[in-house]
Every structure is written in structure tokens, then in C-alpha cells.
Image: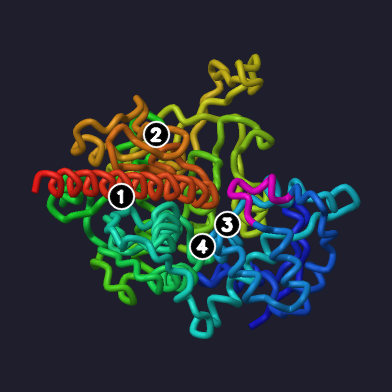
Amino acid sequence: MSFTLTRFSWAEVECHQLEREKALAGWEEVNRGYLTYEEAKAEADRCLQCGTPYCQDGCPNHNPIRDFIALIQEGRVAEAAMLDWEANPLASCTGRVCAWEVQCEGYCVVRNEGDPIRIGVLERYMGDYALEHLDEIDLSDWVGEGAGERVAVVGAGPAGLAGAWFLARKGYDVTLFESWYLYGGVMSYGIPEYVLPQRIIDLEVEKILRLGVKIRTGVRVGRDVTIQDLMEREGFAAVLIASGANQAATPGVPGEDLPGVVTAKDFLMGNTEDLLGKEYGLPEKEPTTVGERVVIIGAGDTAMDAARTSLRLGAKKVTIAYRRTEREAPSRLCEVEHVKHEGGEFMYLVNPTRFLPGPDGRVAAVEFVRMQPGAPDARGRRSVQPIPGSEFQVPADTVILAVGYKPERDLAEATPGLEVANWGGIVVDREGRTSLPGVFAAGDCVTGAKTVIHAVHAARRASEALHRYLTERRIAQTASDEARLVLLTAAS
């Protein structure tokens, strides 16, 4: 296997990268991180061990970054990972997909003198090391001695997995309900193998299952079973909803229902099922194909994943189209550079007006109109306006719509009394409580699509609130039972 050690200036991350030709020939992970302890220690030794760790302020979950780097410096790699697991049970995943450059590394004071500490690569290294030595780690002490009440977690994506971890550590009997056949949520179905391999997610889940957590896949809460069923018939004391935001948005452009026009969600899910279907016993399906010319609408991280996947499926020309400027594109800069390095192209300040069919009825071209920046809106972001008469067409065998996600509504519609915002998100208070007693929610189903570490943090907070709710209920029930016993004793 041939690797090159490369410093990617856009992400300020030094790590091993699979060579371009090898990367495009298959689905192997491109970014290999640090391959030896010596590499990781050399980076960890650059850390100043600040008295005030601003890097932790930049992390949405406030991971114990300074302290786990100190443990790496001392050679205590598994202990470093276990310390991180206290706050973040998905360290190997977030070590691959977090936006470190604007989060933890963006706050690193070493940046003032040069490159920041490469926190993301260190987290990945120690997380992988601990998972590889999982059989040597005793997790029995990680399970609390709670009342053992049963708690249901809806969704086995980042928020659901994290919620199950935190609740099991409190001593609850946790069951995850996942509608898809494969656990991992967006990490499995939405993030390609060459970015986040399923084997890493498998190991993270194995770690969570070792706390006694159970998973039931292929069960859609809101269709196959309701929240009321879980609490009233199956005996769950509380429910944490972490169902994600899986409804793909579309631009509402004429022709978007043509064959060959697909959402990025369906496209990426289909490719995941192609790659993992036999190994994981997924239902058989027609293989995903794209033709030679692919046009992608949108410029977020999902669009970059769709572009890189299209190139691996054999597309000769892949174009990402975005209605604003390159500076305003929502994707991470490192993802943009990966696309460019692998052969993708970009068109900025263009917006689709219609998708045009060919003689066979399939999509054959996209008509765009050129856009021009306008006045700033209330948030300071400039609006964009079409330029009259600037329409032009781009040939396309496949068009992939990557314009966002929103929560699906079937669970809310099947749950009377559950308050939902107009856009579909579940309404909660600051701690994750919904409008229903004993029902909590966290992650993308509350906020809309955000990052994995945001989901972990939301689940951590909601799990604490759920624990307090059940604790207070037990105390109240005990007090009620004691009062009843006093009355019965007096009456006798």
C-alpha cells in the first residue's frame, strides 16, 4: 500500500493520504491519519497545556482535549481515549468528520504562532487505538447502579448512539429502535466509506453494546410502533427521540421528478447499500449508476460526498453548482479541496431553473440562470438575484440534489400532543424535554441537520434531563408509598 505524508494547507492537518489513482479506483479510506505513535506523540508534544484550554470552548461538546493530549504525551493512549469517551463515545467518528478547523483547532492558541495542534487527527488516533484494543478494556465499571428502568431510544444515528451510551452508564436498560437495516444513521448511510468506514462505526457500536444496550433494527417508530406503545404496552419508563433529519429537501424546480434526478440522500444511501449489502444482509437492489456527466446542485459537505462518490462510480465530468460565491459555500474547505484534487469542477453564482428531458424521457440537461450578489440580509449575508437573459444549459446524465434535509413527520403525526415546529423539528426546552411527560428529544430531529459532535452534545444534555426526570419520579413514588404505608399502619 502506497501512502504520501501530506500537509493539507486548507485544513492545516498533516496526515497520510491514499494516492489519488488508488483512491479513485475503489472505496478505501483516503485520509489515514497518523500511522504510528511517534507521529501522534510528536504532534501532542506541540501542545502547550494551556491553563485555560480554549480548544475545549471551541468544541460544541466541550471534550476534555487538553487532558487527553497530555495522556497521549505520556504514552497512555487507551486512557486518553477512555477519558474522551466520558464526554464523547464516538471519538473515532468525530476524529474523522468534525469541522476541527472552526471548532477546537480554530480556538487553539498555537495557531497564533503557526499551525494549530491537530486535535482531530489525535482524537482519531487514540480512538482507533482504543477500539483496536477493546477486548483489553474492562467496561464493567462504566455501567452505573441505577434502578434498571427501561428506556427506549428512537434512532441509532449519532444522537441515538450517544444517548444510549450515556443512559446505560446511568444504569438504565436501554433499547435502540432503528428504522433502517443498518445502524449508524447518517454516519453509515450519508458519509461514504472512503471518509468514515463502516468497520469503525461497528466498533463504536460494539463498545456501546458492551454496556448492555440492545438494538432493534428495521423498526420504524411512528409506523410499526408508536411512542405510546413503547411506554404503555412495552413498559419503557421514558423515551429519547433521536430520529435525525432524513427527509431530503428539493429546490422545487420543474423537471425534478424526471428519471435521473435524485436526491443526495437516495444516491448516497443506494451506494452504501451496494457496497455493504451482502456483508450486512441488506435487501438486494439495482446497482447505483451515474453515467458520464453528473451535475450536483448545492455545495455543502453532502454535495462533496456525492461528487467524490460519482467520480468513483465512473463519471467523467462532475460539476457542483452553487447559487452563491465560493467564499459563501457551506462545505468545509478541506472537502472542497478533496473534490478538486480528485477531478471535480465547480460553478458558482448559478441557479437551476429547470431540468430538461432527452428523447428517452430521462434528464439530459440542466438549465441555469446566472446570479449576482445583492444587498446584505439581516444577518449580514448578501442576497443573490438572477441576471435576466443569462440562462444557459449544461448536459447531464444524472442530477443530484444536495440542498438540505429536514425531519420526517410520521413520528410526530403518530404522537398526539408532541409539539412540532412549522418546519418539522420537535420542540424542546433547553434540556431536551418535549411537550410530553417522559419524552425527550435530541439531535437533528430538533435542530435540523448539524454535525456529529453537535448531536453527541444534545444527546448528552437530554440524557441528563431524562435521568433527573426518572430519579425525581422514583423519589416521589417512594415518598408516596411511604405515606400510604403510614396511613395503612395507623388505620390498622
Residue placed at 76% from the left, 67% from the top? Answer: 70
- Alpha carbon separation for disc pair 2 and 3: 27 Å
Look at mark 2 in the image and give the residue it sits on: 428
Q: Nearer the viewer, mark 2 or mark 3?
A: 2
Mark 4 or mark 1: whose residue is earlier in sequence: 4
Tag of residue 474: 1
Give residue 479's quadrant in the image.
top left
Q: Which amino acid, by three-letter code, is at mark 4?
A: Pro
Instruction: Name the residue rendered at 16%, 43% in the picture.
Output: 487
Which residue corresponds to mark 4? 89
User: Looking at the picture, how far across and down is residue 7, in whole percent?
Assistant: 78, 63
Secondary structure beneath dot 3 equals helix
> What x and y, as percent, mark residue 117?
78, 59
What secondary structure is marked by label 2? loop
* Left or right for 243, reference 19: left
| Applied colour scheme | rainbow
Choose the circle earlier in sequence order: 4 or 2: 4
Residue at image mark 3 = 97
400 within the magenta span: no
Given this view, does label 1 or label 3 mark the residue nearer the observer?
A: 1
